[in-house]
Image (cartoon, rainbow, N blue to C red):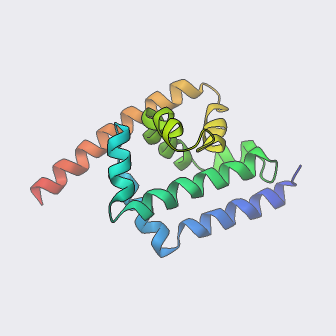
Amino acid sequence: MPTPFESAQLILTLYEQRREETMRKARDFWATFDPQTPDEFMAAMMSPQGAYVRQVLSYWDMAASLVENGAIDRKMFQDSTSEYLVVFTKIEPVLAAIRAGYTPTFLQHLEKLTLSLPDARKQIDEMSARMKKLIEVRKAAATTA
């Protein structure tokens, strides 16, 4: 089990990686990315932003793997960020289909970590509602700009 200091160091390293320029662009893309069908997800994967989709998903699954394998304290990680919950919430509607067509283990660490949250289903549903409102606001702002 990592010490609190070791967990904090890894969490801060993950935070620094999120500030990298390409990762920032990928995270910005995810602010409006909202795949509702496997076809929408695959269209995004094949688009010029496909690298952003892969980067964000692989980043958060990797971070979740560090938690799931004991390199980072679960509570400290969950207390320090909710972005992984946002990512899981957006991908969950199409996850089963992606796994069926891609690989059965796709995002297993991210899913396990997210579902380990207290009241996970409630948190996922609440985050989904917030993300839908945010996307609507961003779309409205984009049409008036």
The answer to whether residue 5 is left or right of residue 118 is right
Query: Residue at image x 17%, y 48%?
Result: 140
Q: Residue furthest bottom?
A: 21
Quadrant (top left/top right/bottom left/bottom right) for the C terminus: bottom left
Query: Residue at image x 43%, y 41%?
Result: 90
Where 56 falls versus 133 (above or below)?
below
Query: Residue at image x 37%, y 49%?
Result: 42
Where 9 falls versus 39 (above or below)?
below
Where 73 falls versus 104 (above or below)?
below
The answer to whether residue 140 is left or right of residue 97 is left
Pinpoint residue 35: horizontal percent, then vertical percent: 35, 42
Pinpoint residue 66: horizontal percent, then vertical percent: 74, 53
Pinpoint residue 18: horizontal percent, then vertical percent: 55, 65
Quick one: 141 or 32, which is closer to the camera? 32
Pinpoint residue 75: horizontal percent, then vertical percent: 73, 42
The answer to whether residue 119 is left or right of residue 8 is left
Q: Quadrant of residue 129?
A: top left
Quick one: 86 or 110, which is closer to the camera? 110
Q: Residue furthest front?
A: 101
Quick one: 4 or 40, which is closer to the camera? 40
Q: Quadrant of residue 121?
A: top right
Where 13 falls versus 68 (above or below)?
below
Quick one: 93 or 116, which is closer to the camera? 93
Query: Residue at image x 68%, y 67%?
Result: 13
| Numbered label tally | 0
